[in-house]
Image: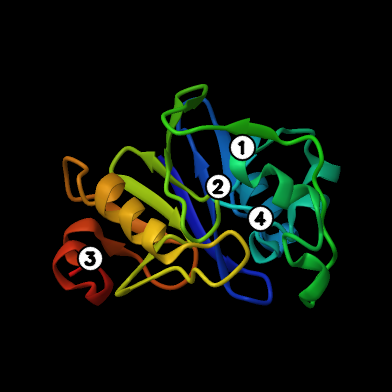
Amino acid sequence: MIFYKIEVGVYGVNAYILGDEDSKSAVVVDPGGNPGEIKKILQKEKLSLKAIILTHGHGDHIGGIPDLLKAYKVPVYIHEKDARILRDKNLNYSSRMPMEEVEIHNAVTMKDGDRLEFDGLVVDIIHTPGHSPGGITLKLEDRLITGDTLFKGSIGRSDLEGGNHDQLIASIKSKLLKLDKNYDIYPGHGPKTTLEREKSENPFLQ
């Protein structure tokens, strides 16, 4: 798999570019900004963008979408419970952040257990609410992209609208910590970690 992690936007979001080495089909996860840099990587690797996938709908994770959609006519995927956030600049907080206001009205909605396939690139959807109602984790091969659900040594905040601390902890413990192997974790902010490390060392999960 072709795999890039780049820090984008004013809040240092980790955007991910995932590509299949044979078909050259690709998806972008959480393009929170720097669309020009994302496009350069797609062009350098000769990747054909098939979709934008969002771990949730908050403004810092969506800021690069409008420019990307001008260059690539692709669907935007989001969990069904965050679709209303994505449609409203006030609910997604882009109207309060130092960035362009973003409202996406025609996103394709997902639910827990969905599998997205793009010419050899397979992404499984795990609903992990708590940071937002429709927060998800993406599972692909030996990687988990956890958005703002789980970080190295920490968890996502739950004080924003629709957040719930108990639900967030339950999502992590019942959905992620029970997975069958030691996945590498790529969060929405900060450095990568592993599932086993967070299971044994994360103070919020003990």
Q: Which mark is residue 25?
A: none
Residue at mark 4 to residue at mark 1: CA–CA distance: 26 Å
Amino acid on which the number 1 mark rests in the picture = Glu
Secondary structure beneath disc 3?
A: helix
Give the image location of residue 149, x and y in percent: 43, 60
Looking at the rendered image, the disc whose residue lies closer to the viewer, 4 or 1, is 1
Q: Is residue 166 above or below residue 173?
A: below
Location of mark 3 (residue): 198
Location of mark 2 (residue): 134
- Which residue occupies 52% across, 21% down? 119
- Which residue occupies 35% across, 51% down? 171
Residue at mark 4 to residue at mark 2: CA–CA distance: 25 Å
Of the numbered discs 3 and 2, the one sitting upstream in the chain is: 2
Can see residue 45?
A: no
Label 1: few (<14), some (14–19) or many (≥20) C-alpha neighbours in 10 Å = some
Residue at mark 3 to residue at mark 1: CA–CA distance: 28 Å
Amino acid on which the number 2 mark rests in the picture = Gly
Q: Is residue 157 above or below residue 44?
A: below
Amino acid on which the number 3 mark rests in the picture = Glu
Residue at mark 3 to residue at mark 2: CA–CA distance: 22 Å
Q: Is residue 191 above or below residue 120?
A: below
Between 5 and 108, the one lying in front of the other is 108
Amino acid on which the number 4 mark rests in the picture = Ile
